[in-house]
Image: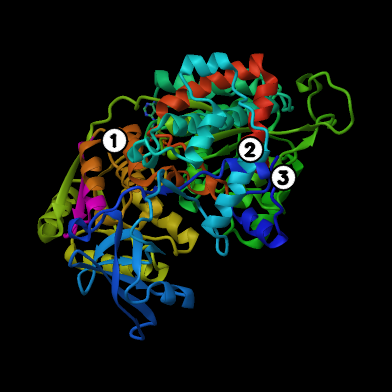
């Protein structure tokens, strides 16, 4: 019997950095890649870019000091040579790589200054008869100071001493044709020689598929559990009374699309339940989410509860404030405005009206959820463009509206029959986003939310035409802008994105404004950018909306939500610098009225491969879902999810795009396990989710 290996505190600390806290975590610390030491390639056949093993004799070895201390050796095999270079090296390596030694080196071949070379290859001394390895060598994710050898030893030991069960009942294993769990991890840690390297490297081998399935299943389970916990929590039930909502529907100058009616039905149904709603409302830019939010707010207000509507930028929040004031004033509802830039006194007045319950609708930026603000009876929090907010802000919002369920001022009919003094009631949440979530993302990372989708645009829109124009033809674009504005249209000129510096961004926006004012003396030109005083921003936007300005020079502050239906031309300068989601959002600012709209993407050559792909995608597609899917492929889920996932371990093995079939199975199996095999579900969560518990409550 092997005994469990003793692990020193220093090693434990290093393991913890890799997320390994229990001995059993070692089993799931799977190789990042494999090295093939089962074959030798002669140096004559070595090609740059390939990772290979070569063998030869050291014919030269010296330490250079320029530009940095470097050990350079020449390895010769049948008259052909290859250089080995080391920047950080130990005396033991100098000794190992002495002239006349016979060496096996494995590494990636590159074309260096003197010819073919390997940088930091793995080397060992061999004799003429030293056998080759018979199986692939795993390479593990490691942290500083923890060697591959140590990891290998600890993992091998864990495999020997730990009892490893396969939690997945056989009936699922058979149905999905999955390999056993133990068999899979053993194979991945010690692949037998006869397995094709490629299916291990690209993770398509059945052993990988089994592990990826388990990972996805655990993720699905945790999302489901979280979802269920929610239905055990309490929120005020807001019955649809139709008192205000019917009135608003009568006042509106348009009828709701059937997609808007459908999502409104879903939201209204949730609000009437005594459990907190957490619903994500997805709809492409311009699909009409604001009016849906307004109607949801009214259902809550009808029940005497408060609503908070939060937007990520001041421009957007202000726009909502104006629009809702306009829509709701005939109903006698006057919203209160709150943003960070309000004067102290006005902020205090707004805070008082919110705290006393004097106002039932508060609209603003994230200032609404700062500590000083407390709501009297918050029933619904609406977050527009939720992808722009981080986890922290969502948490703050979550904590904000909790009130004791026996609060005397709460209508008693809304309380479920539950005793106990400290039951907290929490507000419903409606999150809105125009950044469509690709199907696989929605099924995995967002699976804890309910999702409603507006899948049609209001009628009467004419499709936007997109043109790609090289910077060399800038003058033609100027002519285009001039003639459009002279015939009564309005246009946006979006300044190039300068990510690395806000100062440069600002400078550039001001210069562009100068230039365009000079270019178009006959036009009224305005400027709006992120560093502007917010009252100023709002004033400029107001002038543009009222048609007083014909051309608006803007930074990407107009990316989210801005709604000026008469604007039908947009020029995006240096479009090659922008991401797909951003381009789609920006373009969505035009095409909101009946006029034919045009979006000109000005780009500067030479284009990088990615930039070229992005421009092609945005040129060929207008459907936000298709664009998001392409974006996912270009960037991977990590960046797409942004703040929501920061600090949270992503899927380690599965790739939601490539492994969509496994994800679909995992969803079905998760439901069946929770229903018929709760112990198995618990075993999965323990094995895979032990450290991610906090995330589950976000
Ligand atoms: P988004 O979903 O991008 O937030 P908005 O709510 O700003 O879209 O709506 C875009 C424009 O469409 C607004 O001017 C809005 O008043 C208008 N709109 C919304 N719903 C309809 C509808 N059913 N019919 C016609 N116009 C509509
Ligand atoms: Mg919007």
Quarter of the rendering containing residue 576: bottom left
Which numbered mark, 3 or 1, is in the foreground of this view? Answer: 3
- Asked if residue 185 shows in the view, the reply is yes
The quadrant where ligand 2 appears is top left
Reply above or below: 244 against 542. above
Contact (Cβ within 8 Å) of mark 2 with mark 1: no
Location of the C terminus by quadrant is: top right
Q: Nearer the viewer, residue 1 or 649?
A: 1
Q: Name the residue carrying label 3.
A: 3
| Residue shown at the point (59%, 22%) measured from the top left | 168
Pointers 3 and 1 in contact (C-beta within 8 Å):
no
Q: Which residue is mark 2?
A: 689
Give the camera-side residue of 90 and 698.
90
**Residue 48 relative to residue 671: left or right:** left
Which label is found at residue 593?
1
- The N terminus lies in which quarter of the figure? top right
Label 2, secondary structure: give it.
helix
Q: Position of residue 129 (x, y in %)?
A: 35, 56
Q: Is residue 287 magenta?
A: no
Looking at the rendered structure, the secondary structure element under dot 3 is loop
Nearer-N-terminus badge (2/3): 3
Task: Please state which of the two labelled residues, at mark 2 or mark 1, is closer to the viewer.
Answer: 2
Membership of 605 in magenta stretch: yes
Which residue shows up at 70% across the image and 27% down it?
229
Task: First in sequence, mark 3 or 1: give its number.
Answer: 3
């Amino acid at each position: 019997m092997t005994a469990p290996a003793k692990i020193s505190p220093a090693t434990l600390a290093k393991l913890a950095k890799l997320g390994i806290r229990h001995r059993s975590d070692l089993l799931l610390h799977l190789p990042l890649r494999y090295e093939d030491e089962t074959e030798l390639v002669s140096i004559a056949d070595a090609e740059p870019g390939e990772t290979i093993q070569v063998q030869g004799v050291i014919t030269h070895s010296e330490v250079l000091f320029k530009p940095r201390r470097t050990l350079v050796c020449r390895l010769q095999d049948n008259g052909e040579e290859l250089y080995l270079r080391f920047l950080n090296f130990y005396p033991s390596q100098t000794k190992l790589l002495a002239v006349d030694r016979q060496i096996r080196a494995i590494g990636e071949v590159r074309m260096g200054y003197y010819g073919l070379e390997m940088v930091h290859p793995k080397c060992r001394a061999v004799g003429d008869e030293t056998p080759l390895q018979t199986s692939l060598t795993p390479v593990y994710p490691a942290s500083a100071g923890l060697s591959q050898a140590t990891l290998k030893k600890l993992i091998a030991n864990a495999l020997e001493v730990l009892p490893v069960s396969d939690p997945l009942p056989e009936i699922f294993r058979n149905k999905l044709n999955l390999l056993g769990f133990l068999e899979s991890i053993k194979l991945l840690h010690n692949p037998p020689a006869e397995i094709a390297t490629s299916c291990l490297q690209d993770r398509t081998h059945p052993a990988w598929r089994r592990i990826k399935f388990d990972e996805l299943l655990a993720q699905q389970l945790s999302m489901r559990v979280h979802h269920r916990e929610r239905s055990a929590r309490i929120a005020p039930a807001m019955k649809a009374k139709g008192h205000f909502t019917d009135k608003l529907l009568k006042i509106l100058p348009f009828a709701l699309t059937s997609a808007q009616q459908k999502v409104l039905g879903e939201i209204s149904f949730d609000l009437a339940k005594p459990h907190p709603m957490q619903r994500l409302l997805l709809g492409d830019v311009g699909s009409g989410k604001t009016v849906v939010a307004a109607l949801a707010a009214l259902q809550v207000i009808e029940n005497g509860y408060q609503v908070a509507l939060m937007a990520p930028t001041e421009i957007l929040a202000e726009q909502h404030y104006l629009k809702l004031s306009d829509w709701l004033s005939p109903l006698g509802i006057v919203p209160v405005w709150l943003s960070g830039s309000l004067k102290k006194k006005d902020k205090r007045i707004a805070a008082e009206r919110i705290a006393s319950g004097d106002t039932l609708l508060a609209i603003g930026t994230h200032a609404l959820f700062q500590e000083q603000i407390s709501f009297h009876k918050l029933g619904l929090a609406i977050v527009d463009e939720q992808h722009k907010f981080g986890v922290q802000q969502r948490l703050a919002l979550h904590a904000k509206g909790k009130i004791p369920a026996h609060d005397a001022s709460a209508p008693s009919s809304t309380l479920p029959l539950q005793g106990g003094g400290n039951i907290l009631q929490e507000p419903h949440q409606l999150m809105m986003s125009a950044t469509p979530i690709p199907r696989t993302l929605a099924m995995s990372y967002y699976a804890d939310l309910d999702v409603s989708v507006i899948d049609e645009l209001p009628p009467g829109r004419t499709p936007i035409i997109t043109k790609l124009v090289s910077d060399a033809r800038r003058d033609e674009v100027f002519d285009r802008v001039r003639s459009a504005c002279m015939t009564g249209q309005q246009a946006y000129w979006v300044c190039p994105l300068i990510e690395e510096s806000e100062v440069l961004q600002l400078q550039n926006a001001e210069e562009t404004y100068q230039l365009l004012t000079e270019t178009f003396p006959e036009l009224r030109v305005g400027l709006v950018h992120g560093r502007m005083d917010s009252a100023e921003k709002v004033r400029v936007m107001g002038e543009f909306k009222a048609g007083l300005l014909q051309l608006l020079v803007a930074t990407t502050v107009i990316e989210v939500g801005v709604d000026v239906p008469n604007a039908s031309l947009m020029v995006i300068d240096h479009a090659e610098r922008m991401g797909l989601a951003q381009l789609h959002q920006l373009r969505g600012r035009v095409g909101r009225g009946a006029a034919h709209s045009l979006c000109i993407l000005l780009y500067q050559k030479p284009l990088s491969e990615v930039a070229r792909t992005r421009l092609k995608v945005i040129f060929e597609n207008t459907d936000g879902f298709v664009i998001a899917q392409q974006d996912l492929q270009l960037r991977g889920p990590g960046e797409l999810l942004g703040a929501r996932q920061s600090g949270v371990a992503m899927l380690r093995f599965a790739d939601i795009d490539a492994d969509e079939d496994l994800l679909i199975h995992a969803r079905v199996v998760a439901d069946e396990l929770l229903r018929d095999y709760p112990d198995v579900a618990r075993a999965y969560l323990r094995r895979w989710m032990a450290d991610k518990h906090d995330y589950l409550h976000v």
